[in-house]
Image: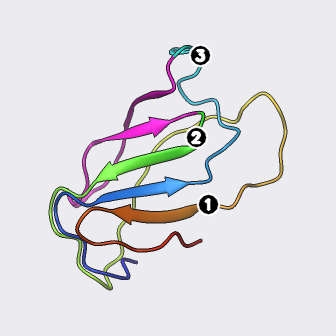
């Protein structure tokens, strides 16, 4: 659920997606690529900025996301070649509205 209203232009970042290998096979030299994002309401952009080495996905808000509403973003990442404990995943925003990273 959105804890604050997010205006268009705000960037939502999902962090903690470390140890993944998404797109690494296809773009081994690139650290940042576009990653398709599925979200049914049209509130977020259809392509996010995937920072494979940083373990982040940044998605722009394209139309207002209301506080208290639930939004679902879907994207595909692959497990990396090395096993690991489940990393902590966080959300943060940048732009006109800011929320601190939270699990």
Count how many numbered circles sit on residues in the image: 3
Looking at the rendering, which quadrant does residue 69 occupy? bottom left
Q: Quadrant of the C terminus?
A: bottom right
Q: Position of residue 20 (x, y in %)?
A: 65, 36
Q: Of the residues tagged 2 and 3, which is closer to the observer?
A: 2
Give the crowd class for mark 2: few <14, some 14-19, many >=20 residues within 10 Å: some
Residue beneath the point at 61% across and 60% down? 89
**Sequence order check, earlier mark of 2 and 3:** 3
Residue beneath the point at 58% across and 43% down? 55
Give the crowd class for mark 3: few <14, some 14-19, many >=20 residues within 10 Å: few
Q: Is residue 33 magenta?
A: yes
On the image, numbered disc 2 is attached to which residue? 54
On the image, numbered disc 1 is attached to which residue? 89
Image height check: is 25 above or below 73? above
Secondary-structure class at tag 1: loop
Secondary-structure class at tag 2: loop
Give the crowd class for mark 1: few <14, some 14-19, many >=20 residues within 10 Å: some
Q: Is residue 85 magenta?
A: no
Image height check: is 73 above or below 92? above
Magenta segment boundaries in residue numbering = 30-52
Q: Of the residues tagged 1 and 2, which is closer to the observer?
A: 2
Left or right: 100, with 60 as reference point: right
Secondary-structure class at tag 3: loop
Q: Mark on residue 11?
A: none
What is the distance, in whole Å, between disc 1 and disc 3 at their CAs?
23 Å
Looking at the rendering, which quadrant does residue 97 occupy? bottom left
Q: Position of residue 74 (x, y in %)?
A: 43, 51
Left or right: 102, with 11 as reference point: right
Q: Quadrant of the N terminus?
A: bottom left
What is the distance, in whole Å, between disc 2 and disc 3 at their CAs?
17 Å
Q: Position of residue 3 (x, y in %)?
A: 38, 82
On the image, numbered disc 3 is attached to which residue? 25
């Amino acid at each position: 659920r959105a804890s604050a209203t997010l205006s268009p232009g705000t960037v939502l970042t999902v962090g903690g997606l470390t140890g993944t290998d998404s797109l690494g096979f296809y773009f081994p030299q690139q650290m940042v690529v576009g990653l398709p994002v599925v979200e049914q309401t049209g509130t977020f952009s259809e392509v996010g900025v995937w920072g494979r080495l940083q373990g982040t996905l940044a998605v722009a808000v394209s139309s207002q996301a209301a506080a208290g509403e639930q939004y679902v973003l879907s994207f595909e990442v692959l497990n990396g070649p090395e096993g690991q404990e489940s990393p902590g995943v966080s959300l943060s925003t940048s732009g006109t509205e800011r929320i601190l990273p939270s699990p």
